[in-house]
Amino acid sequence: MTSQTSQPTYDAHAYRKYFENDFTYLNGFRRNTHRFADGIAMQSPATGESWTYAQLGDRVDRLATGLVGAGVEPGDVVTYQLFNGPEFAQLYLATQACGAVGSPVNFRLAAGETSFILESSRPKVFVYDTELTGMVQDALERSTHQPRLIVAVGNDVPLRPKAGTELIRFEELVADVISLPELRRTVWDETTRLYTSGSTGMPKGVPLNSMIEVLTAHDVIMHFPLSPEDTTLNMTPWFHRGGLHSGGPNPAFYVGGKVVPMRSFDPDLALDYVEQYSLTFLIGAPTNLAMLAKAQLTQKRDLSSLRGIVTMGAPLEREAALLYQKVLTPRIFNGYGSTEGFWNTFLRPADLPEMAGSAGRACTDDDVAVVKVFDDRLAEAHETVAKDGMEVGEVIIRSPKSANAYVNSPSQEKERFHNGWLSIGDLATWDEREFVTIIGRKDDMVISGGENIHPVQVEEALSEHAGVADALVVGVPDEKWGQVVVAYVVQADSSITADGLDASCRAHPMLSRFKRPRAYRFVKSIPVSTTGKKLHYKATESARQDLADGLFVYPTMPSVDAVGVDATTGRHIGT
């Protein structure tokens, strides 16, 4: 007889236990609190303060203790509506340290939009900047959900909370003694919830788990590449995925680098910071780079410490890329993606200037395809268009950095996620080397200064005006902001003016000011299909020429730029 010996098998149980329970983003940060204990984690030019990794770890745990003391339990949402700064960065980590879901919110939203988010996420704690007090007070009055605790950041007069809600200043939330309960969270648990514009224009929640946080950090560390010796300044708001995760707190705190926060973008100040803090990476939208180049040409600074400038939000045109390489740094990068998926293609310095205008090729861990567009269904990943740079299709991506769901938005979830792939909603071509070139939006969305603006939301706000019979909103090219919003309006009352409509939009509680039209054309009718659907693409085609021909009327009120910054003072306007 022959005895048979069973073959040894590999048991992955121990590795899976470690990976799922201990390989979290929070633990990645904690490694740096002793590995780089004396290294500077964050330096705030605005306050003059700095924190070593050991000090930041202590601060985060005392803040997390304060959240627990306020009744925050694992899985509870902590919403914060803040400008870039130390408090934002500390909350990003502290919410994870107590097992909560941190949810940074756009500070440019209108009261109605903020109220919508409060009702959607139902946070136990809401942290806000006192510069936004008027808007936040209005939002809370509108909301059916009232947080248990409201925390005010800043020196301005705080809001008046409703009965049953406590209000404290930020420093009061920081406990004197660390006392955190044992935390049982896995890499699959939600850590961060971002909000992005939905197909109706109202924000939708994008849940990110700890593994997504880790793999996003890894992606940035690979692509820059980013090291513990780097000092970064992300010039975009951190409530954006690209702000938080592209050289912002997420990858820098994971790798052990230094973060320099800038409350709001100022091109001259950003260049001054490069000299003063020996910044190695600047990150921003193409509009930021255009302003940086202009400021550098006006007053030259020493930018020799820069190892790269990374831009997101829109492709780089050839002439712009050449200018930035000459004036700012030869190492210009361009990432393309979305809130849901982070960036998924990357254009590297070696690709320029030949491939300027392209969004680049797929990131290291990502699958990207350009697929056919069908009227009744989402395409499968194998149903690609030709790789000829001519045939137009829709970009879909599959990435470990991508969310695969929305919060309380099943219909929109079905429109975007399919068999593990995310349909971003952009139309594009790709060539034989798989360089993707974006052609436009499938859903007519306007992108102005890196912010998404859905025409439907603006049209609804305009149509509520008694003098408006109908309206159609499109984006037109703008040298500074990429696109700005203009509106075609059918008058119900011939006496309505551009000034009147502008005032109505400014006062509308559900419309952020940066979304309002910058010019109006009064017409007899707007283009529609045989079924009555507004044909935005036709209006987009005609709007450029109409603008050039002087057919649009501009409001005479003081100018406010495309992303809510007063053009004269440079001060942010929250709504």
Image: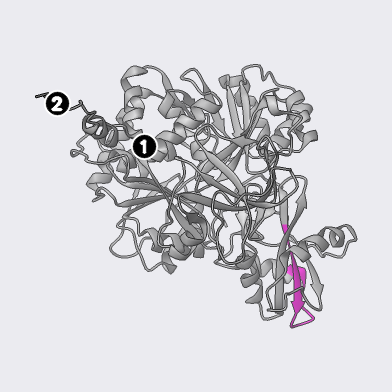
Residue stretch rendered in magenta on the structure: 485-499
- Seen at 33% across and 42% down, the residue is 95
Residue furthest front in the image:
1
Mark 2 residue type = Gln
Mark 1 residue type: Leu
Query: Label 1, label 2: how many angstroms apart (C-alpha)?
Result: 55 Å
Residue in view at x 37 percent, y 23 percent = 53
Residue at x 60% of width, y 29% of height = 282
Q: How many marks?
A: 2
SS class, disc 1: helix
Q: Measured along the vertical axis of the image, is residue 160 above or below residue 154?
A: below
Nearer-the-camera pick, 136 or 439: 439
Q: Residues within 10 Å of mark 1 (few under 14, many from 20)?
A: many
Q: Is residue 114 visible?
A: no
Q: Residues within 10 Å of mark 2 (few under 14, many from 20)?
A: few
Q: Is residue 392 left or right of residue 346?
A: right
406 left or right of 475? left
Image quadrant in which you'd find residue 343: top right
Magenta run includes residue 194? no
Q: Quadrant of the N terminus?
A: top left
Going from N to C along the chain, the mark reached first, 1 or 2, is 2
In percent of the image, x 79 and y 77: which residue is there?
Answer: 525
Residue 126: percent from left, percent from top = 37, 53
Residue 31 visible in the current orientation:
yes
Q: Secondary structure at mark 2?
A: loop
Q: Dividing the image into 4 quarters, which one contains the C terminus?
A: bottom right
Are the residues flagged by discs 1 and 2 in contact, CB closer than 8 Å? no
In front of the other: 100 or 421: 421
Residue 463's disc is: none
Please name whichever residue, 443 or 397, is drawn nearer the observer in this view of the structure.
Answer: 397
Q: Disc 1 designates what residue?
A: 93
Q: Which residue is mark 2?
A: 4
